[in-house]
Image: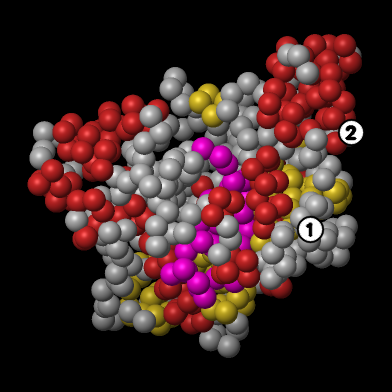
Amino acid sequence: MAKEFICTKDYPVVSTRFGRLRGFVLDGTFTFHGVKYADAKRFHQPVDPEPWEGIKDALTYGMVCPMLTPEVPMGEIMVPHRYWAKDENCQYLNIWTQSISTSAKKPVMVWLHGGGFAMGSSIEQVAYEGGNMSKHGDVVVVSLNHRLNILGYLDLSPFGQAYANSGNAGNADLVAALKWIHENIENFGGDPENVTLFGQSGGGMKVWTLLQTPAAQGFFHKGIIQSGVLDGFGFDVKTDNDGTKIVKAMLEELNLKETDVAQLETIPYETLAKAYGKVALPLMKEGTYVGGNPMANDFYLGDPRDVGFCDHAKSIPLMIGTVFGEFAFGPGVADKDKLDRDTMVKIVSDKYGEGSDRLIQLFEEAYPDKNLTDLTALDSMFRLPTIDFVTKRSKHKESAIYSYNFCFDFPFEGGKPAWHCSEIPFVFRNTELVPICNKPGVSDALEESMFRAWISFAQSGDPNHKELPEWPACEPESEVVMIFDEVCKAKVNYDHDLIPLHKKLNPPFRFGEDVVIH
């Protein structure tokens, strides 16, 4: 049956601080695409967008940030993508809501996309669509683009006060978006005093870096970190490093002098990206700052696991979790349910070598319902630092933290353990858009359990609901983990012996010829 679509000359129109916007209505959901929340010159801090007269259309997704290397479609059956036009002028957001009444006061959920701090966009994944979440959760959903890579995270402060916070320009965009939401979302039916940030991978990293950002205080009230804690990727570079070496190397590569640094503001992005790509890796290997992540300073206070949680971070209720396989993108073990135990033990031992016997014992204690060969896909790269995050954050009683692990076995090639991004369609209630997620008699119930947990948390700061077992908050010595699977259950410290041993025995993950994560 066709859904009702409405878009007339003057409906739906919403007023903002900067002018009026026209969106559209589809099946009762008010939708606004490509809303400009800020403007910014390259390497400089964002400013308010220019106001306008009349009514501006919000019917087209805004530009997304350029990326250092061209995107290559791959793995689309597992994570369907969309590819979009790019421009540095990328400060746009999208809104889905069930009301445009200022009295509606619905919870607001702000999605921060993945891709680290270098790639991605608010519309990159098909599963990022916010219509189903808004409609079935009765919340206002917002997604947004911001500056990435060298545009958002390259420190030029040694070369002039004008660049004082260029190393955090991308996160400054995020703060500008949250400020816009705080000042305008009431007109879209949202409650500016009940805003939840949620994000996956790099989006999860953005959530916890914003926890440590004083300028964001008061603009959000809860946070959900999905596969967002990972050691490495530049966060472990000494904070007393700055952009001197990387910027000098870029200038030299571009045949420019230090006095010509302002020319970096106008050089074509492709030229700038090529120069950066040539000089960054050698410096990265030395442990020298090369940008690419938020930089600890007065704007961003640093990783809370290292410098401690600031008062603001202590006060924000959190959900945090990972998925079973994370980087298990490759093919799984074929026909794994038909293998005998000796064969399964050999497969595991071939990967992990000496110590496999103890690893197998711990795995079967933690996951008695899993196939033993799933151990070859198990993640500890995200899970171990997430345990550390939970342990340190749960010591602060100002607010609660809840932990989860997504462990669903997907109906692909005989059963594929959950991988990085695979929980997103369940969270957004968008499994209908991602064919691989669908498992008759199972996936609909799992989707509802997860979706309701995210919505309940956004409403009240507590993810518990009637279709889940009791899910207590974590304590310093008691990490209660909600296992999202065909049967959901809460378990305490269930993998705390398994994960450190797995991290020790697991071969390093290789992103490319020269980038290895241990």
Q: Is 450 or 277 nearer to us in this picture? A: 277
List the single residue furthest toward the bottom.
Answer: 103
Q: Secondary structure at mark 1?
A: loop
**Percent from the top left, x then y, of residue 324?**
72, 37
Residue 193 in the figure: left or right of residue 51? right
The residue stretch that appears in magenta = 204-232
Q: Please tell me in which quadrant of the rendered image residue 385 appears.
A: top right
How many C-alpha atoms fall within 10 Å of the one at disc 1: few (<14), some, or many (≥20)? some
**Percent from the top left, x then y, of residue 176?**
39, 68
Residue 376 in the figure: left or right of residue 310? right
Residue under numbered circle 2: 365
Q: CA distance from mark 1 to mark 2?
A: 22 Å
Q: Is 461 or 453 nearer to us in this picture? A: 461
Which residue lies at the image location 31% right of the left edge and 72% below the top edge? 48
Q: Is 198 or 363 nearer to us in this picture? A: 363
Which residue lies at the image location 67% right of the left edge and 54% below the top edge? 392
Say which amino acid is labelled 1: Glu
Quarter the N terminus occupies: bottom right
